[in-house]
């Protein structure tokens, strides 16, 4: 039984329909990463009135942290657990949208079931995959021969440069975000300080290695000879989604 606006309403059985639609903002989501659900309630006629809209979470542990509505006459109550409720005194219109922020605290799947109770009952549900929390690296660098911004590193296009950094211990070699490192062409900053790269090599391609004696990772970045007379930003993005940049000017 649900009480709202002085009325008692019995929750309708869950069934997907055009009256209520719920979607999540991302799937999959990492543990301890907030995400949102959007619930759209469509009023099929001007006579439709919904006294209560509820959303319940089941499955892996997750908590509502906020619930809002675009309808000023609707009052929403996040329970701070797995139940949220919005109530109004009889809104007549075309649609209403609820935004619910959720914090997942365990890996698995979370199912959100939205129910609207009123003159026209409706419900919908969606399932979100929660993945284990990813790594968090303690990055330091870049070390010589590469300088950090705002300094621009100058070198000959086509040469390879050792990009050195530390992650505070051996984190293995699977440390990059998918598709990284990358570089992109940028406008040369004529006002930035420029420092020549003292150490480059000509043979081989890009590679990654770790030296436990110095606790240093070295990514040998093989540049392209076609980059001559251009500037580029090098983006070393790690698996914890942190970005680390260096600027280059090629001659």
Image (tube, helix red, strand yellow):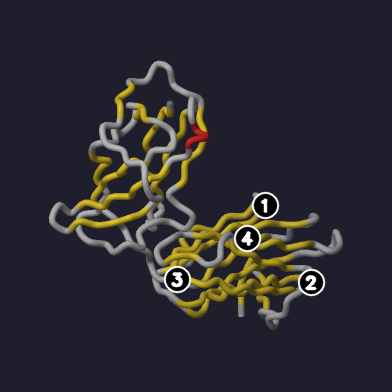
As measured in the structure, the alpha-carbon distance from the residue carrying label 4 to the one carrying label 3 is 21 Å
Between 36 and 82, the residue placed more toward the observer is 36
Mark closest to the chain's N terminus, 2 or 3: 2
Residue carrying label 1: 71
> Mark 4–mark 1 contact, CB under 8 Å?
no
Q: Nearer the viewer, mark 4 or mark 2?
A: 4
Question: Mark 3, mark 1: which one is toward the viewer?
Answer: 3
* Mark sitting on residue 131: 3
- Determine which residue is flagged by label 4: 38
Left or right: 226, with 203 as reference point: right
Q: Is residue 190 left or right of residue 218?
A: right
User: Where, quadrant-wise, is the N terminus in this rendering?
Assistant: bottom right
Question: Outermost residue toward the left?
Answer: 213
Q: CA distance from mark 2 to mark 3?
A: 37 Å
Is 91 on the left or on the right of 197, as rendered? right
Instruction: Choose between 115 and 235: the one closer to the eye.
Output: 235
Alpha carbon distance from label 4 to label 1: 14 Å
* 4 or 1: tag closer to the N-terminus: 4
Of circles 4 and 3, the one toward us is: 3
Q: Which of marks 2 and 4 precedes in the sequence?
A: 4
Q: CA distance from mark 4 to mark 2?
A: 20 Å
Find residue 70 and report its horizontal and vertical position in percent.
65, 51
**Real-space CA distance between mark 1 and mark 2, rounded to the nearest whole angstrom:** 18 Å
Q: How many marks?
A: 4
Q: Which residue is mark 2?
A: 120
Assign a secondary structure to mark 2.
loop
Of badges 4 and 1, the one in the foreground is 4
For residue 159, above or below residue 60: above
**In the rendering, at what x and y percent does residue 122 appear?**
74, 73
Rendered residue at 17%/59% (across/down): 212
């Amino acid at each position: 039984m649900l009480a709202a606006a002085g009325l008692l309403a019995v929750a309708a059985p869950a069934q997907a329909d055009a009256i209520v639609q719920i979607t999540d903002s991302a799937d999959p989501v990492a543990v301890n990463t907030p995400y949102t659900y959007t619930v759209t309630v469509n009023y099929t006629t001007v006579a439709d009135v919904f006294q209560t809209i509820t959303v319940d979470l089941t499955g892996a542990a997750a908590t509502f942290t906020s619930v809002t509505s675009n309808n000023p006459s609707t009052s929403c109550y996040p329970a701070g657990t797995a139940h949220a409720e919005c109530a109004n005194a009889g809104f007549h219109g075309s649609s209403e949208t609820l935004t619910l922020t959720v914090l997942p605290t365990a890996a698995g799947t979370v199912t959100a079931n939205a129910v609207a109770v009123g003159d026209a009952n409706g419900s919908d549900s969606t399932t979100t995959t929660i993945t284990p929390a990813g790594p968090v690296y303690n990055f330091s660098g870049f070390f010589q021969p590469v300088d950090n911004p705002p300094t621009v590193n100058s070198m000959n296009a086509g040469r390879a440069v050792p990009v050195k950094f530390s992650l505070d211990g051996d984190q293995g070699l699977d440390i990059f975000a998918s598709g990284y490192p990358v570089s992109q062409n940028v406008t040369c900053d004529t006002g930035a300080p420029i420092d020549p790269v003292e150490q480059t090599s000509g043979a081989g391609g890009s590679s990654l290695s770790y030296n436990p004696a110095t606790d240093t990772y070295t990514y040998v970045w093989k540049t392209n000879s076609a980059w001559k007379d251009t500037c580029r930003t090098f983006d070393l993005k790690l698996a914890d989604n942190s970005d680390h940049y260096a600027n280059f000017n090629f001659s």
